[in-house]
Amino acid sequence: MPAIHVLDDYYLAITALITIGYQLFFFAIAYTCKFDKVTDFAGGSNFIILAITTLSLSHHHQARQLVATLFLIAWAIRLTLFLLFRILKTGKDDRFDEMRQKFLPFLGFWVFQMLWVWTVSLPVTVLNSPAVTPYPQHRFGTGRDIAGVIMYSVGLGIETVSDAQKYRFRSTHDGRAVCDGGLFAVSRHPNYFGEILVHFAIYMIAVSSAADGYVHGQAYKALYATILGPFFLTFLLLFVSGIPLSERPKAKAQYESGNNWHSYKRWLDRTSILIPFPPQLYEKMPTILKRTVFLEFPMYVFDPKKHSDMSQPGGAANEDQVGRGDDQDDAPQSGEETLM
């Protein structure tokens, strides 16, 4: 049975409409009830709905479609269940403290979540579409397919283990303690690294038919264009909602609390920001390599003189100010350029 055509040949419109409607439904609940427990659930479960919908509409289930679709569903189920469990334990999401009462800023977050779900789902959406499924498919199990399966397994394993390690650490330690064990000894954000691997792996499997010459024309271009999905995810994690919200703000809080700042600073200096790497080697690596190959961009770096009003960890005075009495009030203070 041929695939069902719905609005367009690539299922772009129908998946966009489903995503918009689904997210707006949960936004209405979250905003009206000031309820954080549905936010991450809405994002993760939306992936599952899009994957099942496009696979059901295709009516042409080849092995490559099934593997890519089931991989996306498995990743989304794990993410949804973990985030739901975590929010049920914590009760609220601190990210929304400044916007939960404000309609437009809060809606803006949900619009961004729509873009995230729809864009990252693109490889599976297009692979299941009627523009691609009529083309003959080669047997699943090529080198590219196997590489994708291995990459997916490694990525999902890293993401799962690191999420569990961080949750366990936060459950047994003070919020200011340094999580520097397990996978966090070789990467400051191993969960993000694993998530990036997962979605590039799904793309690698989805694009295999085009790469090996079985899909042609516009469908060939469309499959390759779905690399926008994993690239968009990587962009979000590197520059928008992932690492930027964690690195400098967390370092600033650790510095100003004065609690174990030197251990935290040592962990920052020794540990790769994303790509797992031995800390003994990373510590000695030239800064230029850290900024380029290992993606530790200057925007992540916390400089106390620029980003804090405190001259010393915990708010202590500089050593040369001790014992100066009234002269302290006239001393210049560092941190006038407060960015956070």
Image (spheres, rainbow, N blue to C red):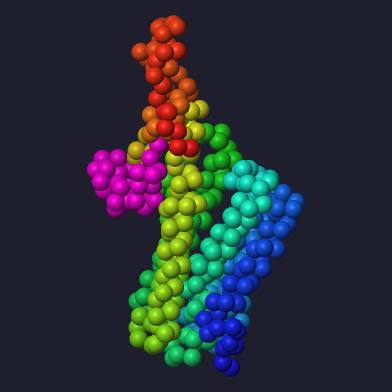
Could you say where residue 131 lies in the image, as x and y percent from the top left? 49, 86
> Is residue 42 left or right of 324 when viewed as pictured?
right
Furthest-right residue in this view: 33
Could you say where residue 309 lies in the image, as x and y percent from the top left? 46, 27
Is residue 263 in view? Answer: no
Nearest the viewer among 334 and 71 is 334
Furthest-bottom residue in this view: 1
**Residue at image point 54% right, 68% down:** 118
Could you say where residue 163 lies in the image, as x and y percent from the top left? 52, 51
Q: Quadrant of the N terminus?
A: bottom right
**Residue at image point 54% right, 41% down:** 169
Per the rendered image, the range of residues in magenta is 273-302
Q: Does residue 89 sit above or below 52 in this rendering?
A: above
Q: How many marks?
A: 0
Is residue 17 in view? Answer: yes
**Residue at image point 66% right, 68% down:** 21
Q: Is residue 297 magenta?
A: yes
Could you say where residue 4 lies in the image, as x and y percent from the top left? 59, 88
Q: Does residue 168 sit above or below 316 in this rendering?
A: below
Q: Does residue 179 sit above or below 207 in this rendering?
A: above
Q: Is residue 301 magenta?
A: yes
> Is residue 39 left or right of 292 when viewed as pictured?
right
Q: Does residue 139 sit above or below 310 in this rendering?
A: below
**Residue at image point 70% right, 63% down:** 25
